[in-house]
Amino acid sequence: MIDFLNSIIVLLNFIIIPGISYGSQLALGALGVTFVYAILRFANFAHGEIMSFGAMITILFTWFFQSQNIGLGILPTALLALPIGIIATIILCIISDKFVFQYYRYQKSVPVVLAMVSIGVMFVINAIIRIIIGTETIKFSDGQKFIMKAKQFKVMTGLNEGLALKSSQVITILITILLLTFTFWFLQKTKTGKSMRAFSDNEDLALLSGINPDRVVFTTWIIVGVLACVAGTLYGLDKSYKPIIYLNLVLPIFASAIVGGIGSPFGAVVGGYVIAFSEIMVTYAYKKFFVYLLPSSIEPTGLVQLLSTDYKFAVSFSILVIVLLIRPSGIFKGKVL
Amino acid sequence: MMKFERYEWLAITIMISLFIFVGFIQGWSVSLVILNMCIISAIMTMGVNISWGYAGVINFGVMGFLAMGGLAAVLVSYPPIAESWQVGGRGLGISFALLVVLVIAVMYINKTVIQKRNKYILNSLIIFFGILIIRHFYLNATHNIEDVNPAIAGFLGGLGLPIIFSWIVGGLFAAGIAFVIGKVALGLRSDYLAIVTLGISEIVVSVLKHEEWLSRGVKNVIGLKRPVPYEINLQNADWFINLVTYLNSSKLNNIIDVSDRQQVLNNLIIDGSGIFVKLSYAILFLIVMLIIFYFANKAQLSPWGRMMRAIRDNETAANAMGKDVVKQHLIIFVIGAAIVGVAGAMLVTLDGLFTPSGYRPLRFTFIIWIMVIVGGSGNNLGAIFGGFVIWFSWIEAAPITTFIINQLTIGLEPTNALKLHLLDSVPYFRYLFMGLILLLILRYRPKGIIPEKVRHS
């Protein structure tokens, strides 16, 4: 029985909790990509950089607050700076729309052209970030680092295995729940949300019934800005902030959005968790888990690892390719908010 | 054969004069280094341009195909490591044979089992257990190989042939990978295809990074043989010394003192040997570029090129006229990738080393796409022009930015924090330039600087 509990704790500690927090970050990112895709109808390659930008502004203000000795006690100061980051990210989104994307929308350009344009935006934001904050790795989480340390847990329960709970993980999960609830409530219950859904379903019909497209697009960018900034900051808080990582993060985010069914917000969230869990589960070495579960005579000798952790990144893509082959529309039929 | 319009001549003149200008300002060595990379970039751009410009097939996997070309350069030119083959060859052979059996089994099941659910279940079972068995042999073999003298070897080595063959092999490697990707992904809509090719190229690079038995991974392969002479051999070759003496005879004759003259001559020989090597590279690359350019133009003007244009402009209509769109898309995707692969092998040849961790999408996929868009998709001269101009500005962005920042902050103290910070971030301004160039071109000249010629006949 104790062995069974121990094995469960191992899974919880190394797979489930990291999976949920990484998955939440991916889900928020994928939700942003899906919003752009459903309303503006293009694949936004700049999304990773928008996330990075939001995180950067948050970091700058975190530093400012820290220098003024303003803090939240046991909570990281970044939470205080987050609203400012969100506002800056929304402004960035709206500026990029006004000066870049709007023109092509009025021209009714094909999606590929808009994707190219978003690559241009990606380069520009990327450069701005690097010029402002450089390329160094930045750790900006302060406050209490752990809610529960592995040792405390061991003492508390008397089990062999520890269960560590980082405060950044708990914050990630809580904020994600909050944000997702709000987003879905907004889409289902408010008038603006309904008009957005109508717009993504059938643009012409929505225009005919008097929905103002500019307003819909404006609202979309606000939502995208909020989601991107929160996702970027949470990722930076949980791991550490490094500008180059966000470019690599674009691919798993796209994978999540497509696996879930691009254009479907619920699909994007599910896709985020699917990608996160498969990345972690495929590359985790299960030796410890089996050691507890199996009798010692048939204990595994190797690491019992499907793929080495080097391929963490490739896993999300293999899943993407497999899903596209078997079910091109994604798990949930996409296209409509 | 082909006639250039006046603005095309202008473009060619601009390209040539840029290099002459840099030659006089920053020295011929710098100019030739930039020229070599420009030519390679131009070849990559032509490869992407063939699939995107001719047929509208998007290829964001440039980085992966380049890496395959680079791998070819290693596998062709590096001398074979006999010991590695001894300890790991058999295991690798067995796992490869088993893999072939597995693939055949899966294909057989796909053909015979009709019910969809049974097919999936059988396939996943066979693949799962097949991989478990293969892993056993494979991991043993690779582990043994990586243990062979890890400081300098630790991989299988290559064939030990002249590296110039790898340019063709690199094309074939890239074409092979492209064939598989194309089979899997070409049915997808264009933006999905972009993401999938981007992802697969990441997978290719991560395999090269981590499969050390094959490519030495992040430990890099250095000291690849050159197709051109080494500087040190040139400096001791009589004909080269005579050549340098002859070229600089007027300058040398002015110096009366013998030891002074010898000193000047020695410096000239050292400089000259570097320039000679770079010039030989440039000539080799130029030949390849012109061959590809010639055939790409020929193909574009041929009935096949017309068919491609028809498919690009209206897929449905071309399909209705009896053209096999899927097959032609696959063909053009493979051809484009092969050309990129050639460029990848040339890149590694020029550097003399293979660094898998150096392949990053920003540098090797997106910049190439900017070259295509800026130059003019559908026009090969435009592709070359884009490759030259963008690479040139990529390199020259840093000195120009330094100059501009110094001019703008001329009133500030030299120790001013803002000034120092800006000067520190000079390398990042090139991304800003690239993004702005792309955005401006897409906005005001969406067909590129040298647009595709519309032929009415």
Image (tube, rainbow, N blue to C red):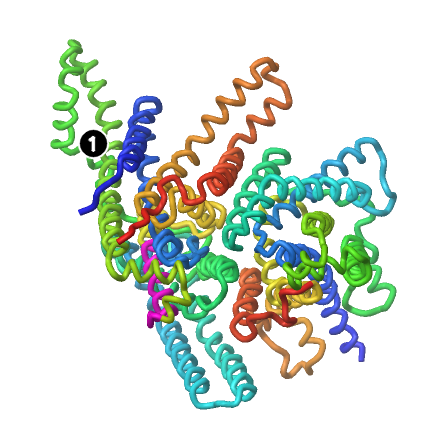
Q: Residue at x 37, y 53 (%)?
A: B53
| Residue A196 x, y percent position in the rendering | 72, 57
Q: Is residue B156 in view from this perspective? A: no
| Residue B358 x, y percent position in the rendering | 45, 48
Relative placement, left or right, of B420 versus B355 is right
Which residue type carries mark 1? Gln
Secondary structure state at the residue bearing disc 1: helix
Of A273 and A286, nearer the camera is: A273
Of B218 and B34, nearer the camera is: B34
Question: Chain ID for label 1?
Answer: B
| Residue B355 x, y percent position in the rendering | 42, 49
Q: Residue at x 40, y 42 (%)?
A: B448
Give the residue pinned by disc 1: B235
Q: Is residue B107 above or below residue A131?
A: below
Q: Which residues are magenta?
A: B321-341
| Residue A24 x, y percent position in the rendering | 72, 60
Residue B338 picture quarter: bottom left
Q: Quadrant of the C terminus of chain B?
A: bottom left
Of A105 and B383, nearer the camera is: A105
Q: Magenta includes B324?
A: yes
Q: Magenta includes A20?
A: no
Q: Residue furthest top?
A: B256
Q: Is residue A188 in view from this perspective? A: yes
Relative placement, left or right, of B329 versus B401 is left
Dominant secondary structure (helix, strand or loop) of the stretch shown in magenta: helix
